[in-house]
Amino acid sequence: MSEIRQPNAKIWRRALAGGIDFCLVAAFALLLMLVTGLLESAEAYTGGFPYLRVFFLGVTSYLILNGWLLWQRGQTLGKYWLKLKIVNSQDGKTPALWKLIFLRALFFGLPHAALIGFWYLVLIDWVFLFGKDRCCLHDLIAGTSVASVAPALPVAPEAKTEPQSAD
Amino acid sequence: MKSSSSVMRGLTFFSKVQVVLVLSVLVLSIFFQSIFVQVHAADCEESQADLAGAFPQYWGIDEHSTRFVPAEHTTINATNVHQLKLKWAYGLESNSPRSYPLVTKDTIFFGDSGAGLLALDRETGCVRWRHEDSEADVASAILSRVTESGLTLYFTSRREGVFAVDAATGKTLWKASIDDEPVPLYSGTPLLAQGKIFVPISSEEIGLSLNPFYGCCTTSGGMAAFDATTGEQLWYLPTIEEPAQVIGRHFFFVEEWGPSGVPVWSAPTFDAESGLLFYGTGENYTEPATLTSDAIFAVDAATGQRRWVKQFTAGDTFNMGCVIGGPNCPDSPGPDLDFGAPPVLANNGRGETVLYAGQKSGHVHAMNPRTGDVYWSKHLSRGGYLGGIHWGIAADEQAGLLYVPISDFPSGGHSDLPAVPGMFALNLSDGTIRWKNLQDTDSVAGFWPGLSAGIVAAQGLVVAGDLAGGIAAYSAQDGSVLWQFDTAKTFTTVNGVPATGASIDSHGPLLVDDLLIVASGYGGVSMQPGNALLVFQLVEDSVDASQTNSLEGVASE
């Protein structure tokens, strides 16, 4: 269990969590690519760069690494380590998985797309982050926000009397 | 899910302003981009071209690839070449133009790489039409053939294949590619003969080998024949016939394959008398090396059957992974000594037709075209993986000369030999050097002045561009420079696009009628990029000075 400490987390923590996820997913996709040989043969490059295969590797890696955490806690690995959580902006609850995957996670590929020239798409998404609500475009579309969380404190035990000295 | 309007209602005022600003910038960008394109269109008022007299029909000027322009096709010769003045310059979109023009009575067709095929007015440089097919990344000379429906243009796009285009309208008639290889690269210029179009096939694996996670390499180069009317594939002959096998692994999982490679990236040569097609090949990408790399092929043009293959450098395995020290580089990489220059068929002065081939190694080989037997070989320079002899040689049968441009760009080769960039004239009969004119490598502060591009010869002269941007006409008699021009500068252009000249490489200059046409700025393989298409014209001495000056004034430093 965890509790929301701050409804809209600080930008640097979100960016760091995003950076961790970015690197982890890329590294895992690389491993997956090596093991499966999906991008190893000439056939993969027939007709140009194999965008579909790269997309498939990215999605699969993202889901393997983050799927369970997203479903259970509304967190990715990066957000878990940075103590962040995705919540519904309306009620503060963990969003439905479909919303996290089909609306919000679609934007996860943008930083990767930036590497091949679509940097402006990232800017369009991130420029909203500097608004009052600290929400990116993907948050606005999915109706979510990123909250800072802290582990719930254990229930405070009832006050005990100081043991009496046997003296 | 919220609708977009409900999403907007949920935003703060500041966020709404941001949304509006971002969308406005996007819309304005698209608007100004379209305006920019319109400003630089420079379209002609008359889009209809006079298609009579299309020249040349081949990369090599004729089907023997002599690169010699006879007097009936050019008035430029040794006595008047000094009268060449810049007529106009056109700013290309590509900074690595790799095309060779086709010229008609009033139009110049030229490939602007990814920007497509251009039909330019010969007098003014305005655009008659642009080939609209966005897939057409022009990578070859523009060829033509008169058909029932008029003049048809042919060219290759590096990744898409062969295009046939209506010369009158610029519309694609057909497009063809091969299914025999998964990643073919159509980087060579085809040849039209006997109703067929013969298309050289290279492989994208040369670039994929840079990727350390790619399992290099399984594909082969080759030659394909298509019906020139319909685009139907008639035959395909790979340069490697044995299938690739796994030969090793790296990073535990990535499989290494071989044999592979042996691309064909230069135009073929055709002998109508024997019905044979001749072409040169490149190196193997991976081990084991085959007997077909760095070789000359003779193939029956009708059936695609090999007649003979003559290899000149054995055991040459090399790919781009070697340039970066990548894991795909073979254990014992070779020197990469392709035949990038099409073989030339010419009379040797003793009544015999001889096949001449220039190699990146700096060798010229003279062969019997029926058997491949070597008459003589001449080693002219230190060579290297960028030549040596790179894109093309030329033959003047009347003068009995074989013109051989030497680049010797620092790129491997025989390090114990000095670099000798320059123009060599050999006797067609025995390969002895008649004369040579070496470039001055000491006084050049800028780029390496090697002669890498294809060259062109005419009555009493040979014209060559160099990698530093210079272009010169040499006397056939003694190699003295009759005319020269430095293209490595900026030009005011007829289409308003800023143009810079730089390395002259790839297909090189063309002589046609009273024009010399050359693209300056080939940025491929580490050369200096630029985007100038330059048209020079003979201006007679009798023309008054004001007119001459106005023509010269087109170029600005």
Image: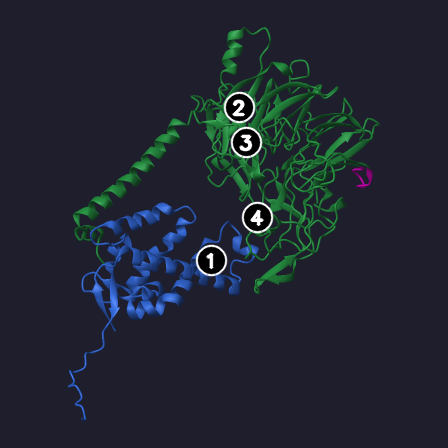
Chain colours: A blue, B green
Q: CA distance from mark 3 to mark 1?
A: 36 Å
Q: Residues within 10 Å of mark 1 (few under 14, many from 20)?
A: some
Q: Which residue is mark 1?
A: A53
Relative to B41, B451 lies left or right: right
Pointer 2 or 4: first along the chain: 2
Q: CA distance from mark 3 to mark 2?
A: 22 Å
Asked whether the residues under marks 4 and 3 belong to the same chain, the reply is yes
Percent position of residue A82, x then y: 31, 63
Instruction: Tell me what residue is drawn at x 64 percent, y 62 percent.
Output: B248
The numbered mark at residue B207 is 4
Q: Residues within 10 Å of mark 3 (few under 14, many from 20)?
A: many
C-beta proximity under 8 Å, tags 3 and 2: no
Q: Secondary structure at mark 2?
A: strand
Percent position of residue B475, x then y: 71, 19
Chain to which mark 2 belongs: B
Q: Which residue is mark 3?
A: B521
- Which of B482 and A103 lies nearest the eye of the viewer? B482
Q: Which residue is mark 2?
A: B107
Q: Secondary structure at mark 3?
A: loop
Relative to A34, B72 lies left or right: right
